[in-house]
Every structure is written in C-alpha cells, then in structure tokens.
Amino acid sequence: MSKLKFFIEQGKQDLPVYLTNVRRDFLSSEGADLILDLERFDGRYRRISLRLPIADIQSAEDRDFIKEYLFAEVYNILSSLGGSNLTIYTTSSDENLTSIFKELKDVFGIGYSRKERKAYGRSVNVIERMLDSQNVKMPFAITMIQGEAPKSPENSAQGEEFAAYFVKAFTGIESKTICGIDIGGTDIKLSVSVNGKLCFLKEYDWFPTLFVRSEQLIQPICLLVRLLRARISCEGATIDASVVAGLDEAINRHVSDDEMEQAVVRAEQALGDSLRGFDAIGLCFPDVVIKNKIVGGEAHKTRGIRENPAIDYEPEFKKLMDLNDILTEYCVPGGVVSMTNDGPMAAFTAAMEMIAAGRSAELKHGRFAHTMGTDLGTGWVDEMGKIPEMPLECYNFIIDLGSFKARAYHPDDLRSINNFNTRLPGTVQKFMGQNGVFRLAIKASQAGDGTLYKTLLEKGFIEERDGGVFVVLEPKDMRKPMLEYLMGLCEAGDPLMQEVFQEIGRATGITICETEHILAPSTKERVLYGRLVKIPPCFTLIKRGVAEIDSSFVVSVADEQNAFTSLMLQLKDHPVYTVAQFAQSVGAVYYGNLNS
C-alpha cells in the first residue's frame, strides 16, 4: 500500500510534500501503470512511466490528491518539453482512473481559446505560441488510449563536435563591437565589448510585472542599447566633453529614464553621422525564446500586460515577439541579434568557460545551469552542444503537493506557495530564488519568536495590508534591499536564515530530481548563477541541502574561479562588479558573436 494517507496528513500540517517522494512511493506500490509519450517539436519522442495507486482511494480527499499528482506530472512535462501532442496509454479500466482522464483534457484547456485557459492550461498556451512561431497549424492534443503502449519510438539526432561549435563564439571577437544583455525580473545588466576589450557595464533596475503595455518593456531595453551605442560612438569622435560626461553618468549611476533619455538624445544629435551600430547584440530574456523570438507569454514579467482589460493580449504580446527585429536597428548593416532564454544563456556561458579552460572533454555530457535570482532560470546545452528548442520553464514545475495552509494566501502574499502567473500551488517559483527566501524567512520567523518578522516590518521591507503580508514596492522597490539584508544575516551566521538557505538547497535538489525525471540529461552537475549564490556561505548551505536530497548531484557556482575566457577574466578584475553579477551579460556577448 502507498503512503497516500501520510502525504495528505503532511499537507494538512502545512508541511511540503515533494512530488519526487510521492512518485517514488507510488512507483514502488501497487497501482495502475501509465505510459506517457510526448512528441517534441523536433520530431523526437520522450517516454515517461508513472503509476497511480488507484486501489488506495477511499475518499474524495484521496482521489483529489492522486488527481493533483497526475496533473502536476503532465504539467511539468509540458512546461519543460513543450511538444506537438501527448498520448497516454494504460491497460487499467478502473472507474476512478477513467474519470480522472476525462477531467484531464478540460483541466489543460484542450479545445479552449487561450483567453479561456487557466492554471494548468497556461502551459498549452505557451506550446501553441511556439507552434505558431513555426507556422504549425495543428493544435496541441492530448489523447488517452486504453491498451498496451507500442514499442518506444526511436530517437535519432546528430550534432557537431562540442568544441567545434562553440569556437565560433570566440572567432573574430577582437575586431567586433558587441553588446550583451541579461534581462531579469529585477534588473537588466549590459556589457559591451569593443575589439575584445570589456569597455562598459551598465545595471538598470526595473519591475516589468507592473507594466500594462508591451512598449513599457521594449522602450527601456532600447534606451539602454542606445545609451551604450552612443558611448562607443564617442571614441575617436570630435565631441564636447560634457556630452561624454553625461553618458558616463547615465552608465555608472542609477539615473531616471528621463535623465538617461536626455543624455542619449544630446549625444545622438552631437554625433550625427559618427553614430555607429553594434556588429552584434546577444541577449537573454526571462521567457520562452525559440529561434530568436519571445513566444511564451505566460511569464510573471508580462502579467500586467496579460491582465490589462483595455487591450487584446495576443496582438499586444506579438509586439514583444519582435524585440529582436527592433534591436536590429541599433546594429550595423548585416549585424545580428541573437536571443535565448536566461537559463540557456547560463548553460552556454558555463560551457564557454570550460572550453576556454581547456576542459572541453568534460562537456561530452553537456552543461546544465540554473539562474537563481528573482525567479529560477533553467538552461541546458545538451551532449550534442545544442540548446534544445523547448520551453524549459522549470520555475513553473510543481514540486510540492502539500503545504495546504500556504495555499490559502493570495499569490502576491509573501507567505503564499501559489504561482504568480498560474495561481497553481507548490511551484518552484515559491521555493527557490528571491521569492523562496522571502517566503521561508517569514514562515520560519512566525513559527519562532517573530523577531525577524518584526525587524522586516520596522525596516520598511514588508508591509501588512488587506489581510496579507507584502514586499514594499512604493515609493521604492524593496525587493533587492530585502534580499541583500537576509543574505547578510545568513553570511553573519544567523541560524534562522542558515536553515532557510539549506531548505532552498533541498528544494534545489528536488528540482534537479524533476529535471532528471523529465529531461534525462547526461550530466549530473548543475552550475548556479545569480544573486542567491554570490555569497559563499549562502551557496555552501544550498549545496548542503542539495546533498541531503541526493549526494550524487554536483552543484557549482559561477564565480571568479570559473572565469577563463578573455572577457570573463576582465570582468573578474573589475573594481566594482563581480562575475556572479555580470557573467550572463558577458556570456551574451559571446552568444551574439556566435552567429555574427
């Protein structure tokens, strides 16, 4: 018999019930076997086996838990792999299983419009936009078949030598001007390489979730690129020193958009025909990106646009899809804009550094990376040296089927485990990254003496309103300062925050288990980027938590010890910024060069 009752009781105590543990228990128990065959965008197949302890169902509560487990498994598969259709085979004719299957299509919105789809169905919206971008007219389908599954389809794929592919990213960079852009949910980081020299770094804070039009996302990105284009154009040009000083101030300090615009317009007018473009722009964007096009549309960053009642979302989102074409305006004739998701950019960057270190032989199993910042980014360069064309939205993975009390809070409430976008409970978004730190710190403090919670209120990091607890966003966005404060406590040895970071490590370990289960990458290592791992004691605790889940997993941090390319070595020596902060924007420079 399965531990079904035990799992439900854990959830009632507001404890996490990790999906990995549920699956392992169900597979070791008696039940109905399922075979899930997903046809991917590239024509390859992924087969996954599951088991449901249908005979253990004695109440509606039991049935609901098993149903939620199955929906979570399907949702995670679609969120990471995408695909054109999913076929589920079973030899069981149990009525409970049959009724759950009947709900499955409705829950995922098969046959519904994108506007009608909610929760689990949002993964299908992403898939449909991916299909649209490839001019595939057939809608995504889920088919249930009672009977034996056929022999597993053969997958055939061939890639070029890993190092041979990546050497293109190094070639000719000494004679090009390239801009690399790392777009996140809290800030944008830009790096400019001129003839192989890392010349300018720019950090820009923003909060795109509050935007209600695509232009509000697009315009700051374009303004930043114009700023750096103007600055590189000043080199060798006859121009008033005050113009250059105005650009330098806009680059090196946090100035308003209006001040930045004024400095840029003044410089553009002064430069005239001397204004020159970039040979290439490489960038990563926190949404699904396929063939340089943003095609997801269900991310937290576009929530304000998606929920704006004054617009039709689909045509509005298509404006954002064209970001790569818009940025081409700031390139020289024939210049290219190469775009991917922030996760794949992290994996690409890690692979680049290994090749530069002369360790290309170690890449035969590929490279897998996570960015741990505002959200979790996931990137994979497979054993063929390619970034697979798939959503890889692992921050949307459902990993917790418990924590019932925390489900009652609004997604924006810091105590909630509900996803900001889908409203689904238990996703990675609320267990790792910035949101995980905030939630776990408040939960631990309120379960203890409440001292930390009171301090966060007194310091103006959080506020109580409308029956909930929220991070302060106005008049100043306190997300970054609050994260820095909590990480500082951890670094100083605060036991509560040390336990928080170790719990984040456990969630990281569970997330690695889920990527193993669905994606089956050859590598066991995960390279971590982002603010959460830039302080060594925080990373050490995350690493310790991962080992508690599975000691065979290897996690490493992208820091100064992993700097081997010329540009990354220059970043390592930068007097202000660190590799942990700007590694991806530097990696984006090489990514931009890859196809230029």
Image (spheres, rainbow, N blue to C red):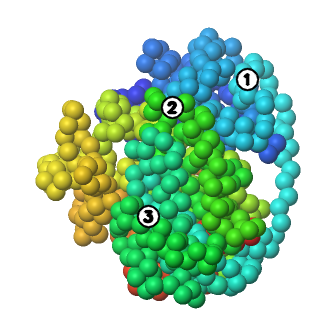
Q: Earlier in the sequence, mark 2 or mark 3?
A: 3
Q: Which residue is mark 1?
A: 143
Q: Quadrant of residue 137?
A: top right
> Disc 1 and disc 3: Cα gap in Å?
53 Å
Q: Which residue is mark 2?
A: 311
| Residue 91 or residue 64, whichever sits in front | 64
Quadrant containing the C terminus is: bottom right
Q: Position of residue 491 (x, y in %)?
A: 29, 69
Instruction: For marks 2 and 3, give the one nearer the viewer.
Output: 3
Q: Is 119 positioned to the left or the right of 430 in the image?
A: right
Q: Position of residue 231 (x, y in %)?
A: 52, 77
SS assignment at label 1: strand
What amino acid does circle 3 point to?
Glu
Question: Pointer 3: residues within 10 angstroms few (<14), some, or many (20+)?
Answer: some
Q: Earlier in the sequence, mark 2 or mark 1?
A: 1
Instruction: For marks 2 and 1, give the one nearer the viewer.
Output: 2
Q: Is residue 278 visible?
A: yes
> Disc 2 and disc 1: Cα gap in Å?
34 Å
Q: Quadrant of residue 459?
A: bottom left
SS assignment at label 2: loop
> Relative to 593, is 174 above or below?
below
Q: Is 397 positioned to the left or the right of 409 in the image?
A: right
| Cβ atoms under marks 2 and 3 closer than 8 Å | no
Q: Which residue is mark 3?
A: 261
Question: Pointer 1: residues within 10 angstroms few (<14), some, or many (20+)?
Answer: some
Instruction: For marks 1 and 3, give the one nearer the viewer.
Output: 3
| Residue 9 or residue 38, whichever sits in front | 38
Residue drawn at x 72%, y 21% is: 144
